[in-house]
Image (cartoon, rainbow, N blue to C red):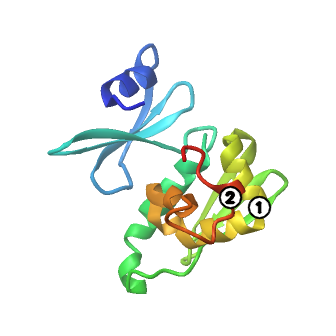
Amino acid sequence: MKDPLAQLRSLMVGKKVMVVDPPGAGEAICKFVLDDGKAFRLHATELGFWIEETAGVNGYGSLNALITDYGHHMYNLLPQYDFDPPSATITVEAGLVEVKAPDGKSFIGDCAKFSDYEQLILGSPKGREILAKHMALGDYWMSAFRSTDNPDCPPELHWKNE
């Protein structure tokens, strides 16, 4: 959804806010947890506002949300790695993905909740390898799956919108 106000309305109208937490991310105002179990962070700068999905009561609703949280986590760790962090460790077992950051923090998601494309990436050894190298990019991770940006990405894993 390109219109942030429409996205905010679709997330909140007719629902109750159960929790308002600290955001845990730069430029974010807060994290909302709604009565349907979904959660999102509201970000704002002088340029406007935007919304990022995050783990709610029922975990992550997408691999993208998990990766975005990983990117926020890594943001504060990047200086200790001279902005060249080691790859994440990605394990897929029994329908769950676990992504471990270099400091040991784990991010776990249920693959069944992820899109077909996200499941395709996680089901491919090459997909996991590419993803592990680019996890710290946070919400820019899909750039690693564009044929023009990464010639090592096999065609079957190219980002759908190309």
> What quarter of the picture does the N terminus occupy?
top left
The three-letter amino acid code for the residue at tag 2 is Pro
| Towards the viewer: 32 or 98 | 98
Residue pointed to by mark 2: 155
* Relative horizontal placement of residue 73, taking residue 93 as reference (left or right): left
Kindly identify the residue that appears in the image at 27 percent across and 52 percent down.
27
Q: In this view, does 52 lie to the left or right of 141?
A: left
Q: Identify the residue under disc 1.
A: 124
Give the x, y percent position of residue 107.
61, 59
State the residue at coordinates (61%, 40%): 61
Q: Which of marks 1 and 2 is nearer the N terminus?
A: 1
**Residue 4, picture quadrant:** top left
Name above or below for residue 68 compared with residue 59: below
Label 2 neighbourhood size at 10 Å, few (<14), some (14-19), many (20+)?
Answer: few
Image quarter of residue 83: bottom left
Residue located 48% across and 80% down the image: 85
The secondary element bearing badge 2 is classed as helix
Amino acid type assigned to the residue bearing label 1 in the image: Ser
Q: Which residue lies furthest to the top in this view?
A: 14
